[in-house]
Amino acid sequence: MEKTNRTILCVGAVLLVVGLIAWIIQLTGGLIAGSNMTNVFLWGLMIAVFAFLVGFGAGSQFVASAIFLLGKEELKPLGRIAAVCGFSCVCGAGLAIMADLGAIRNALWMVLGINLSSPLAWDMIAMVTFLVLSFIQLILIMRGSGAVKVFAVLAGLAALALQIVEGLLFSTQTAHAWWATPIMPIDFLAVAFVSGSALMLLVACAKRYSDAARAWLGRFCAIAILVHLVLALADLALVAFEGTPESAGILAAIGSNIVLYLAELVLPAIAMIMLFTSGRKGAKKPALIAAILVVIGIFAHRLMLLFPAYNAPSLYLTLSGTDLTTGPYPLSTGRYLDWNLTFANTTPYFPALPEWVAMLFPIGFAMVAVVVILAIMKKLQPKH
Amino acid sequence: MRYAMAVDLSRCIGCRTCAVVCKNYNSQPQGIWWNRVFTSGTPEYDVAVEVGDQLRMEFVPVSCQHCSDAPCETVCPTGATYIDSKTGTVLVDYDRCIGCRTCASACPYGVRQFNWGTPAEMVGLDDTTYNYGYPYDYRDDGKLVYTPHRPEGVMEKCTFCAQNVAQGLEPACCSACPGNARIFGDMDDPNSAIRKHLEGKEVVQLGEKYNTHPNVYYVVSHEVTQVNRVGKDGDTSTATTEKKEG
């Protein structure tokens, strides 16, 4: 096993074990002790990690499909890694969503009593479909089969569907104006392209690929960033011009989290400029810096899915018999004692220590899975 | 049959008895409130709002709206949240809920309450437990929709006191309201108390833009108004109170 792979395996294993312990603490002590979420701020860090990983998974598959379909011989080893990353990251994302459940003891009902009108059910179906197709693709890659191209198309389409469904999971929730926009599913696709190409750019830097390979990935990534930024800014403009109490709440929530929001926009923008200028020929240093900036920026983006959505109230009343729209109607937060906020319109959210540590569980799992699957593929590869 | 509730805003005195009795009767854990009452238009309680030259103080109780097109039911991945076909009531089967919280996220009324975990122990009661609330489990066609031994990590909310209604009784908030501001009944029955109460009255529903078709109806209040005693010049000598009929 190569040194880089050994390092990833060791770090991943540590993250997996530490994260698993934190998750078990959350499971036994209840989310009341192990998280800072409330009935106002319903989804926290683990859901951000879920969206983060699923984007990297689908995006890696897009890179893999592009490599196999375009027949780029020199990039085929990278295509193999991309396909493995796609499978592993989506497995990690599935684990993240399972870890976020309050009553995992009832999880079997996801199969026995599945409600096909639920976007979460579509998500599960899309995820399982992708994993099956991706798994078959990995076997075909390992055997060097000519049918890889067929499954590169199928797994690529499944990744596309997965990202659209992820977007719909949010955009169908009309109670949150920050999500309820048709831009959301398209932006989920753009973010996946950004994430996957950035991850492969990191791999290309670590594995000493050619400048040409990095230049190709860099162009891929920079164009995807441009599309994502256009969509993100269009979304912001729509909110800014909406002029409703809900949109004012969203803008206030963005203002309260302005550092995170700027990180979401500025870091990928810097990366894009680097990739279009100093990194356009595939130089290692700018490619590496750009990829790291993108990873941080996309994590901020995933967190910013949550803050303006949950901290912008959805229920405004009209004083009966008048046209006077009154202030937002407070919610019961579900927290007590330490919170002093039994009822509130917004609640501050900074993840609790167990949340920070538990998020390492799916990330560590994905890292370990990548190295283990690559090792298995290498071992079982037919000798020619 | 379609169960519904009318909340007559001209009768509500903002005492919050409904919220407290609901919490107690339905054994709600700490921090959880299925029912809440706030003063419309102010972040504080018991504060009047200026409308034209008048001050108005209106209390709006909000609990589950038991929507006919309930987004919480649509998004629930396991069918744990369902609309009872016999009564039209939106219920949650605690044995099926996986605690994903998608339903609460989809609800525009913010009425769903997630049970975040084991409640804190009572201070100074050693190993004894203070029990309150309706003491028996209630199952609707086998689905556990009420239990005093609340499972943690699942979603809960107003059931229109399904355990009562099954016995021909009113929800606890209706029977406890000192102003008889809450009227419960079958909207499909023209002789029901709710239909009779709503007849000829001006009614509003919450969050109409979300197209959820709620089954909670708010009777508009025009009743008590007070001329703003602090005029723009700060003169309080002309303070008067008048009463208008809606």
Image (cartoon, helix red, strand yellow):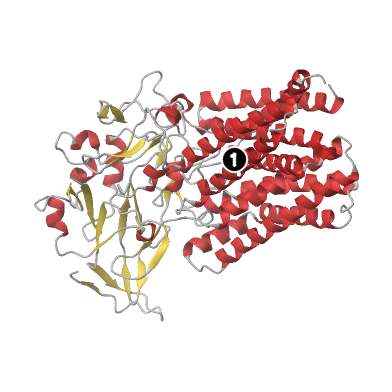
> Quadrant of the image for the N terminus of chain B?
top left
Question: Residue A342, can we see it?
Answer: no
Q: Position of residue B173 (x, y in %)?
A: 24, 44
Q: Position of residue B112 (x, y in %)?
A: 39, 43
Give above or below for B58 relative to A196. Answer: below
Q: Position of residue A306 (x, y in %)?
A: 57, 48
Give the SS element for disc 1: helix
Residue beneath the point at 87% across and 54% down:
A280
| Subunit that carries the residue with mark 1 | A
Residue picked out by circle 1: A158
In which quarter of the view is residue B122 placed?
A: top left
* Nearest to the observer: residue B211 or residue A57: A57
As drawn, the residue found furthest toward the front would be A146
Q: Amino acid at mark 1?
A: Ala
Q: Residues within 10 Å of mark 1 (few under 14, many from 20)?
A: many
Residue beneath the point at 14% across and 37% down:
B168
